[in-house]
Amino acid sequence: MVTLSPADIIVLVLYFVVVLAIGFLSSRRRIPQVDYLLAGRSLTTPMFVMTLVSTWYGGILGVGEFSYRYGISNWTVQGVPYYVFAIVFAFLLAKRIRRTNFTTIPDKLEEAYGRPTALAGAGLTFFLVTPAPYVLMIGVLLQMVTGWSLAVCVLTGTVATVIYLFTGGFRADVNTDVFEFGVMFLGFGVILPFAAAKFGGWRFIVNNVPSNHLTWDGGNSLQFVIVWFFIALWTLVDPSFHQRCYAAKSGEVAQRGILISVIFWIVFDAMTATAGLYARAALPHLDQPVLAYPMLAEATLPPIAKGLFYAGMLATIMSTLNTLAFVSATTLGRDLVARAQGSIESPRAIAFVRWGLLVMAVVSVALALLIPSVIRLWYTIGTVIVPGLLIPLVTAYFERWKAGPGFTLASMTAGWVVSLGWLIAGWSQQMGDASHYPLGIEPMYPGLVVSLMIWAVGIARTN
């Protein structure tokens, strides 16, 4: 439970009022599918950057948890690999994606490999973009403020974040992201000067955190660090990246926007990593490291500043939650249900997407309550789903790399099934140690290897 002054509460109420106002004002009574799903393919570079930066950085409590546990290795694990693959995405895929003029990832899979692969890919995409980690984070923050049960807070936060998407669609998502982009930088820009003034500068951190917190690996095994680099391959198959490229005015806007976004991510990572180290140094005995940032705010910030910081955390989470909720609903409603009925271009597809928002909410709330750790949710979803999607999706954009439809579907299916089986066979609540998995190998590796082998056989047979 946190303590908020009346001024802090006013700041938070104003934040929610502005977000909801922007979301509902973006709504239109009659809206064509391309506008509802992609804002009419009208994103300029500034809009593209602000929506992508805020969307791709939603896991703020997870970042705080990781920084508190492992120090600056958070940057090594949660930062650098994502910069690398975002840059790869910009140069390898951004223009190609926009050139297709498709709407979703399964559209491309169907064009390249046929409907069965598209439907399988849609199923994997639905779970890949589940906003469960962000539903959990907003629930935790609301629980701290209100004292309500986690289940009630998770449900309340989910409804408040996605309700305007029913009528506003992607345009409402983007417009709220633009506002939340500014609020998230403001929030972390507020806490660092107050922490430095109260506790001291870098010397205070060095003297009060474990030595491993200032090493590149945080004291974890090399395999644990490397697997997070493989999880960063998520970037290449992330539907929100693809969605924004489809919605950009041009391929040049998409490519340039991603490269500019990397600069903003580096700046924001520097701010969040420093805040995490301050939390570890000033509050060394937290029972729940996922609350590192809120507890640092409690120990550091005066009224109004605390409200701004909480608004910054909420903005970081909500900007990602609403995007993933919308992509998840689109995947379920349009790419699974409507595609199975052969009606992805009909007006009924929008109605299916709206029903998809309801289903998405139920699934995400259930996952958030079943696996109440942000890092474990990221780890589980990325480890299982990425091996299935990576090779079929990336190769779909390169004619000479495409295997036959049957081999591609087999590669996709085997990738996630093997990783899931490996995970179940050795699942443990202890993270950072692969010794409990079969052969001491992280589950993502065998899934990727099997998927790659089947794809290679398919290429050989095709050629």
Image: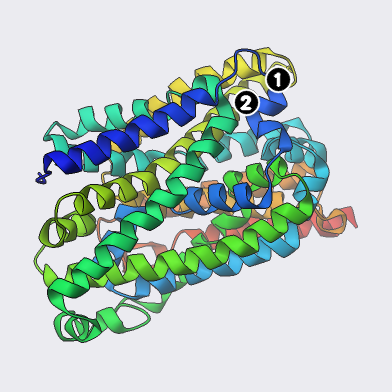
- Indicate how the structure is coloured in the image: rainbow
- The tag on residue 182 is none
Question: What's the CA distance linking mark 2 and mark 1?
Answer: 20 Å
Which element type, helix, strand or loop, lies under badge 1? loop
Residue 102 horizontal/vertical position (percent): 76, 37
Q: In which quarter of the image is the N terminus?
A: top left
Residue 36 horizontal/vertical position (percent): 64, 25
Q: In this view, does 286 lie above or below 38?
A: below
The residue at the point 22 percent across, 37 percent down is 10
The residue at the point 30 percent across, 64 percent down is 66
Badge 1 crowding class, 10 Å Cα cut-off, few under 14, some 14 to 19, many 20 or more, is: few
- Amino acid found under the numbered disc labelled 2: Leu
Q: In this view, does 214 lie above or below 242?
A: below
Residue 120 horizontal/vertical position (percent): 63, 35
Tell me: 168 left or right of 149. Answer: right
- The tag on residue 32 is 1
Tell me: 217 left or right of 32. Answer: left
The residue at the point 33 percent across, 50 percent down is 312
Q: Is residue 155 above or below residue 59?
A: above
- Disc 2 versus disc 1: nearer the observer: 1
Q: Mark 2 points at which residue?
A: 336
- Amino acid found under the numbered disc labelled 1: Pro
